[in-house]
């Protein structure tokens, strides 16, 4: 179901899945191009959660997705405030789930727990943006708004992202893919969708992650 939520800067779209009772998972996608590459997979994951009796929401953030706010007007503080506002609409125990750089966004939300898929520090995210831009022949002009990976990004957002780290407020569960050497509570042998040149999907991975996320959500909510 497509819904909308209000935050201090306006109103954004919100997708809702699954039952209207019990815990609800709020998913934060990674920013910029990785959001496009993972959105289809993310929707499949949330639908798989619904099949397991767990509700979920996927909010658009200011300057991302179908938001009417230009990408260059986005800020990390607005993303965090908007995500927290979306979570507050549920009236139920919320588990903040995130993919990659999405783990930089949920820190201000009032949640019962966190579940992070391959969480990425902001400094690494910014380095990757610059690397991809350099490969594409883009250059950091030093101006207030920078074109990176096809996105016009304000310098304050880049600076804020570079200093940001994933929220580690407990309880938190970290899942990683393949040979990623970083610490994890669960490691699954699967290819990272965010590395693909085009948007993709992995139904088998979505089902496996949904099993883990559903169990974690119920444990965090005490159900």
Image: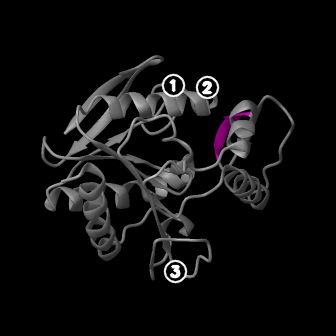
User: Is the residue marked by circle 1 packed among few (<14), some (14-19), or many (20+) residues within 10 Å?
Assistant: some
Picture quarter containing residue 136?
A: bottom right
C-alpha distance separating marks 1 and 2: 7 Å
User: Is the residue marked by circle 2 packed among few (<14), some (14-19), or many (20+) residues within 10 Å?
Assistant: some
User: Seen in the image, is 58 located left or right of residue 103?
Assistant: left
First along the sequence among labels 3 and 2: 2
Picture quarter containing residue 11?
A: top left
The span picked out in magenta is 150-154
Q: Which mark is residue 73?
A: 2
C-alpha distance separating marks 3 and 1: 36 Å
CB under 8 Å between discs 1 and 2: yes
User: Seen in the image, is 130 located left or right of residue 83?
Assistant: right
First along the sequence among labels 3 and 1: 1
Q: For mark 2, give the secondary structure.
A: helix
Q: Which quadrant, please, contains the C terminus?
A: bottom left
Q: For mark 1, give the secondary structure.
A: loop
User: Seen in the image, is 60 located left or right of residue 138?
Assistant: left
Residue at numbered disc 3: 178
CB under 8 Å between discs 3 and 1: no
Name the chief secondary structure element in magenta.
Answer: strand
């Amino acid at each position: 179901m497509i819904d909308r939520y209000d935050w201090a800067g306006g109103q954004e779209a919100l997708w809702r899945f699954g039952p209207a009772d019990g815990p609800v998972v709020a998913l934060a996608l990674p920013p910029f191009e990785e959001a496009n590459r993972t959105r289809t997979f993310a929707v499949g994951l949330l639908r798989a959660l619904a099949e397991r009796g767990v509700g979920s929401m996927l909010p658009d953030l200011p300057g991302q997705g179908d938001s009417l706010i230009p990408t260059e007007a986005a800020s990390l503080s607005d993303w965090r405030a908007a995500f927290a506002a979306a979570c507050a609409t549920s009236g139920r125990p919320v588990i903040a789930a995130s993919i990659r750089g999405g783990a930089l966004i949920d820190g201000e939300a009032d949640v019962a727990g966190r579940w992070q898929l391959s969480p990425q520090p902001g400094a690494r995210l910014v380095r990757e943006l610059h690397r991809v831009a350099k490969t594409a022949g883009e250059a950091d002009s030093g101006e207030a708004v920078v074109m990176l990976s096809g996105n016009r990004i304000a310098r304050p957002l880049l600076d804020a992202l570079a200093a940001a780290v994933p929220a580690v407020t407990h309880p938190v569960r970290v899942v990683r893919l393949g040979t990623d050497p970083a610490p994890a509570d669960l490691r699954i042998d699967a290819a990272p969708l965010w590395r693909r040149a085009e948007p993709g999907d992995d139904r088998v991975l979505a089902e496996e992650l949904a099993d883990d996320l559903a169990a974690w959500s119920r444990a965090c909510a005490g159900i």
